[in-house]
Image: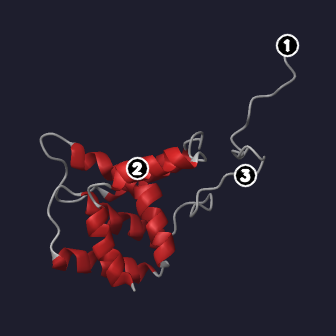
Amino acid sequence: MSDVSAPSANDAAKDPAGHPIHHPVDDGHAPSPARREAWLALSELFLDTALDAADIAAIARRLRATGLPAGALQQLYQHEVAPVCWRNLQAVPGGAWAGFEPAWLVNAVQQHLARPPLLHAWKPLQHWRVTRWTARTRDDWLRVKALLV
């Protein structure tokens, strides 16, 4: 019998140096209304439809209304919404185009954040994954981001 206990749900993941690994904008609690609204607004970038200037402006307005800084919104886009929604743009024949169901989206992001960050700490893989997840939405994100200033 081993005297090493299995990790509990309360054990934080650690990097190779033994420091706890935290998601950049994850505080370990239920999402704030601002964060939830940001997820919903950012998910529109992943709908299977072309976004015109009015759509981009509307997304930017919703994001500004959250009060979250641009850096936090960038993190939400890349590390919370993109990993959950990017496949919608890969779906054949076509993915969702009218919008994601809010309860599904919030649940999917929370499930993604709850996964152990086994490979998240390895920067080259993390960069490749973000690049893949955001490839088809990056130009629209940059248009939104320009309006956040």
- Few, some or many residues within 10 Å of mark 1 (<14, 14–19, 20+): few
Indicate how the structure is coloured in the image.
secondary structure
Task: Report how far apart the C-alphas of labels 3 and 1 lie in the structure.
Answer: 29 Å
Disc 1/disc 2 C-alpha distance (Å): 40 Å
User: Closer to the N terminus: mark 3 or mark 1?
Assistant: 1
Relative horizontal placement of residue 101, taking residue 149 as reference (left or right): left
Numbered disc in front, either 3 or 1? 3
Query: In this picture, is 1 found above or below 125?
Result: above
Name the kind of residue labelled 3 in the image.
Pro
Residue closest to the far left: 93
Q: Is residue 93 left or right of residue 30?
A: left
Helix, strand or loop at mark 2? helix
Image quadrant of residue 137? bottom left
Q: Are marks 2 and 3 in contact (CB under 8 Å)?
A: no
Identify the residue at horizontal 36%, vertical 48% (top origin). 132
What residue appears at the point 38 percent right and 54 percent down from the top-left corner?
A: 82
> On the rendered structure, is 90 left or right of 123?
left
| Residue drawn at (59%, 56%) of the image | 23
The structure residue drawn at horizontal position 32% and vertical position 78%, both measured from the top left corner, is 60
Q: Amino acid at mark 1?
A: Met
Give the residue number, with chain letter if any, for mark 1: 1
- Name the residue tied to disc 3: 20
Q: Quadrant of the N terminus?
A: top right
Q: CA distance from mark 2 to mark 3?
A: 22 Å
Q: Is residue 40 visible?
A: yes
Where residue 69 sits in the image (x, y, percent)? 50, 79
The vertical placement of 9 against 72, above or below, is above
Circle 2 sits on which residue? Answer: 83
Mark 2 or 3, nearer chain start: 3
Q: Nearer the viewer, residue 29 or 138?
A: 138
Of the residues shown, which amino acid type is indicated by label 2? Pro
Q: Residue furthest top?
A: 1
